[in-house]
Image: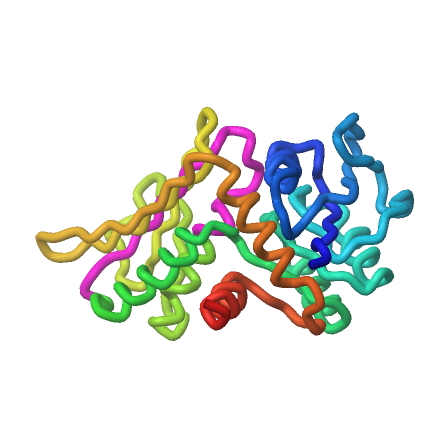
Amino acid sequence: MNKTKIIICGISGKMGGNVLSLLENDGEAEAVCGVDPFVKSLSVPVYAHFSEVKEDADVIVDFSSAENLEERLAYAAEKNIGIVLGSTGFTAEDNKRIEEYAKKIPVFKTANLSLGINLMQTLVKAAAQVLGDAFDIEIVERHHSPKKDSPSGTALMLADSINEVFDNRKHYVEGRSGMVGPREKSEIGIHAVRGGTIVGEHEVMFAGEDEILTISHSARSKRVFAAGAIRAAKFLTGKAPGKYDMKDLLAAENAES
């Protein structure tokens, strides 16, 4: 069986390094090179720009940043290969660009590549359906101090899943300060904590009359996201143009088992 050939974008960063490390012992996929403005000497060639890449590949795994998105998408379209977008913090314009490229190539985009988080997404949606407006909903996310975007893409993904239950009638309140008045039933509170080396923690609280239900997830290592990205890369290889996410990956894996 031919191995899935992967270009790691952002290979010099922590997430890119985790992907490279896991691929060294993967029997179904391999890293052929990396692209990163911070060129380092690694076990595979590393280039500063996609225009320098010489190796053939099946898919790009991107853990760089929301910046220079066009370069990655354009290269994938030129080579007719897929791309796994593991970054967050995309603007509305970025998302529009991603939608356009998904008409030409397979694009895997998710706010979180963890299996546990995607199960949590299902659980919080089910809880919202049962509890309804009788319970107030608050989301707390915690990440390491260098994280740039806030709230996290995962927190927004969880909020959006919950809001689907309410036909998107809820509005998001990011933190509270000053005399904001009583909490409204139409709110979903979202709060960001930044500190130390926290990998990623998300907590959704449903607070009702005399009882509280909390659903939470804690990532203890970045390797969980790297493993998810590799699974996504294998899934995406050979797919038709379109936009895919973890629901599609899990459905395909369940169908095979």
Coloring scheme used: rainbow
Magenta stretch: residue 136 in it? yes
Query: On the rendered structure, is 96 left or right of 173?
Result: right
Of the pair 160 and 224, the residue shown nearer to us: 224
Outermost residue to the left: 210
Which quadrant of the structure image shows residue 97? bottom right
Placement of the C terminus among the 4 image quadrants: bottom left
Residue at 77% over, 47% down: 68
Of the pair 216 and 137, the residue shown nearer to us: 216
The number of numbered discs placed on residues in the rendered structure image is 0
Residue 14: percent from left, percent from top: 61, 32
Magenta stretch: residue 148 in it? yes
Residue 8: percent from left, percent from top: 72, 44
- Note whether 41 is above or below 107 in the view shown: above
Residue at 60% over, 36% down: 18
Residue at 60% over, 50% down: 230
The magenta span reads 134-155
Placement of the N terminus among the 4 image quadrants: bottom right
- Note whether 125 is above or below 63 in the view shown: below
Residue at 74% over, 52% down: 5
Of the pair 95 and 48, the residue shown nearer to us: 48
Outermost residue to the front: 1
- Note whether 130 is above or below 66 in the view shown: below
Residue 114: percent from left, percent from top: 47, 50
Residue 236: percent from left, percent from top: 65, 63
- Note whether 70 is above or below 250 in the view shown: above
